[in-house]
Amino acid sequence: MNPILISLMLAFLALTSCSKPEPAKIGFIAGLSGSRSDVALSSRNGAMLAIEEQNARGGLFGQPIELIAVNNHQTIERVRAVTQTLIDEQVDIIIGPGMSVMAVNMIDMINAAQIPTIGTTITTTEVSNLDDYFFRTASDLSYATDYFAKAMHAKGVRNYTIIVNTSNSAYTEGWRNEFLSDALKLGLQEQRVIRYEETEDRASLLAVVNELKSIDSQLLLLITNSVDTAVLIQQLKSIDYEGIIGASEWAGTDQLIELLGGNSDGIYVNRYIDQGSNDPRMITLANTFKTRFQSELGFPALMAYNATLIAIDVLQTSRDGPEIKAELISRGTFSTVLADVELNQYGDEVGAGFLTLTQIRNGQFITIDAIK
């Protein structure tokens, strides 16, 4: 063979053998637009910050990590479409979504594509104990409902009315059913369930508002997003409702306080964050987040930041979907900010994780107890 040709072939082989691998791709999926996008936008910022920090340390494989964020517009049709977008982009791992109903409707797609996906604020029991590619850093809602029921019982509550937003039914109906079971064990009676579905004209929410005057329960529980929770609480304050007002984790963002102002004081809310924590990593993250995004670190950002830390960790071992899944399950415990994440054989968080019971006082979420 021609010596020159041999030299060229050897040079080509040397170049290709030394070429850098493709940049790692992390997908992010959530409802990034609309008036109820506070959870999604906060989550995206948390994931973005974790990736920016890793890229400042050199990224992965000598190249910056690529974040590919897609907007599911909080509809089932769009979540499937943008999940396919991430599959086509050949992302290594996905962070999100933030709504339980979205997770339920995309799991079959990520399973088929074998793309590990780490949910951020997904707590529905509908995805518990499944051998699939969906993982989550948040405990299922049974922890939240059990503790909330016990806290309300300790305050003397013996009956309640619950308002349920059915647009995220995988979460809200599950929350109501779990709380009903927990409450009955303690002697708390459910007097009434009021359901509504989100609409563009908000007619269904206005119909709920009209029913508030007839509520005389000791506790009114709102299982909906922060915007609708704020609307309902404003109405309750205007009619001088004298009972206790409680809201689920979905409403526990800073937007709730921003919308209500002084009317937010006294409300009980479960949250996946302890903003008063003295943990050094938590303090550093909160300060860094505020500098970067000009906003407080909320629970969606914390959950997404931690989920992304886990993703980056396992990607250093493999970029093969089945191997990543096996790595997540075999390792089980991951060191994250505020509390370790402990996954069982199905990829579900086995403890209460970051869950705290808070009450709003003087316009701030004050931690009453960290749920262990």
Image (cartoon, helix red, strand yellow):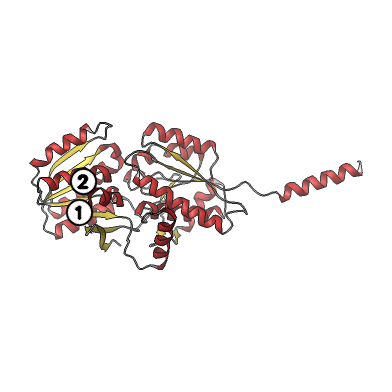
Disc 2 crowd rating (10 Å Cα; few below 14, some 14-19, many 20+) is many
Dot 1 amino acid type: Gly
Tell me the quadrant of the picture where the N terminus can be found. Answer: top right
**Circle 1 is placed at which residue position?**
262
Q: Is residue 53 left or right of residue 249?
A: right
Task: Say if residue 328 shows up in the picture.
Answer: no
Q: Position of residue 221 (x, y in %)?
A: 18, 48
Q: Which tag is nearer the camera, tag 1 or tag 2? A: 1
Residue 224 lies left or right of residue 295; in this view the side is left
Left or right: where does residue 142 sit relative to residue 162? right
Q: Secondary structure at mark 2?
A: strand
Q: Residue at x 19, y 58 (%)?
A: 151
Which sits in the foreground, 203 or 336?
203
Mark 1: few/some/many CA within 10 Å (<14, 14-19, 20+): few
- Please, what is the three-letter code of the amino acid marked with disc 2? Leu
Q: Earlier in the sequence, mark 1 or mark 2?
A: 2
Whether residue 130 is visible to the viewer of this picture, yes or no, is yes
Task: Say which quarter of the image contains residue 232.
Answer: top left
Q: Quadrant of the C terminus?
A: bottom left
Which element type, helix, strand or loop, lies under badge 1? helix
Percent of width and height locating residue 100: 34, 43
Q: Which residue in the rendered view is the most extreme toward the right?
A: 2
Counting from the top left corner in percent of width and height, residue 68 is at 50, 43
Q: Which residue is found at the position 29% from the left and 47% from the top?
A: 250
Q: Determine whether 118 is above or below 85 in the image.
A: below
Relative vertical location of residue 332 with respect to residue 32 in this rendering, above or below: below
Label 2: which residue? 222
Q: Which mark is residue 84?
A: none
Percent across and percent down for residue 4 are 90, 43
